[in-house]
Amino acid sequence: MKSIRLAAVMAAAMLAGTAQAADTFVLKFGHFLPATSHHQRLIFEPWCEKLKSESAGRLSCQLYPSMQLGGTPAKLADMVRNGVADIVWTAPSYSPGKFPRIEAMEQPFMLPYGARKSNPMVWKFYEDYARDEFTDYKVLAMHSDGGMGIHTARKPVKVLADLKDMKLRASNRSSAKLIEALGATPVSMPPAQMTESISKGVIDGVLFTWNAMRDVKVNEVTHFHTEPSANQPALSSTVLTMLMNKNTFNRLPDDLKVIIERNSGPALNEFIGEVWDGEMDAAFKQTPASEIVQMSDADYQAMQTAAAQVADNWVKEVDGKGLDGEALLKGARAISQIQ
C-alpha cells in the first residue's frame, strides 16, 4: 500500500510539473538589426521584460537579432506567419507586393519628422485602411521610422541639382522611386551593408533616418546631412511593424493574451515613439553643426514638385492590382494632414 501511495504522489508531482511547464511560454523574437542596436536594448528587451514581469515569469522572449533565425529581412513576414518565429520586427515594404495598402504612408513627403508625431497616423491608417493585409498576423505595433533625410559622404545636397548622378541607398520601393524622381540612382541593400558601401564609394550616401545612424555606423562615413526647415514633412518614411504568429497568440491562456494586448497597439507605438525620438535627437545633436546642410523652403518645395509623380504612379500601380489607389492616397493624406 505504501508503494502504491508513493507512486500516486510521484505521478501527481510529475503531472503538476508538466502543467507548470506547459503554462510557461518562450517567444522566439527575430529582427534584422544587431544586438547592440538601441532598438533591441531600449525597445525589444524592455518590452519583453515587461511581459515577463506582468506574467510572473510565465511569458518571456528569446531574442534573435541579425537574422539569426535564418533568411533575409525580406523573409521575416513569412517566417512569423509560418511559425519559424513567434514575433518579428520588420518593414512590410521589405516584402514587395505583400502589403500594398500600407505603402500609401510611405509616399514622399507624407509624414512629419518624428515618431511621436507620425506613429499615431500610421496606426490609424492601418486600422482604417490596411487591416485586411495583416489578417494572417497578430499585429503588435505599426509605426514609422521617424522620417528619412539625405546623408552623403563627399558632396553636400543643397539644391535639387546636387542629386544628379548620385547613388543613394533606398530602404523601400517608394523611397527608391523618390530618389529616381530627384535625379539620383537608387541602390537597394540591407542596413548592415550601407557603411562599407559608402566608405568604398559604391554609393554616395543614403536616404535614411537619424534614428539608426549610430547603430549601423553610417554617421562615421557621412559628412553632409541635408535638413529642411522646421515643420516641413519628411522626404520619405518607412513603415515598420511588430508581428506575432496568430497561432502562437491563440494558444496562450487568456490571462497572458490580456498582458500582450495591454502592451501592444497604441501603447506600444507610444513607447516606441518616445525611445525613437530620443535616439533621433541624440544622433542629431552629436553631429557637428558644420556637417548640417540647411535647405531653404524654396529648394525643398522644388524637391516636392519633382517627386509629385511618384504618388501618382503608385496610385496607377495599385489600381492595377484591384485596389482603389486614389482612395488610399486620399485617406493617407487626410490622416497626415498633408495636402
Image: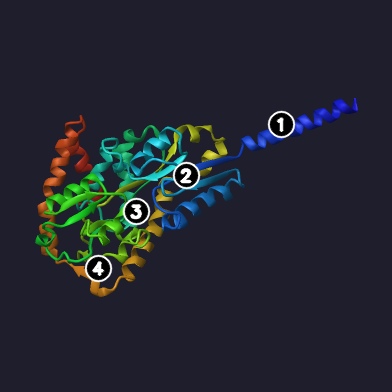
Separation of marks 3 and 4 at Cα, in angstroms: 19 Å
Separation of marks 1 and 2 at Cα, in angstroms: 29 Å
Q: Residue at x 76, y 31 (%)?
A: 12
Q: Give the left or right position of residue 9, taking residue 96 as reference.
A: right
Separation of marks 3 and 1 at Cα, in angstroms: 48 Å
**Image x and y of residue 40, in percent:** 45, 54
**Up-down: is 225 above or below 260?**
below
Instruction: Choose mark 2 or mark 4, whichever is in front.
Output: 4
Separation of marks 1 and 4 at Cα, in angstroms: 63 Å
**Image x and y of residue 287, in percent:** 30, 70
| Between discs 3 and 1, the one toward the N terminus | 1
For badge 2, the amino acid type reads Phe
Q: Which SS class for mark 3?
A: helix
Instruction: Choose mark 3 or mark 1, whichever is in front.
Output: 3
| Between discs 3 and 4, the one toward the N terminus | 3
Outermost residue toward the right?
1
Quarter of the view holding residue 167: bottom left
For badge 3, the amino acid type reads Ala
Q: Which SS class for mark 4?
A: loop
Separation of marks 3 and 2 at Cα, in angstroms: 19 Å
Q: Which residue is mark 3?
A: 192
Q: Give the left or right position of residue 316, taking residue 89 as reference.
A: left
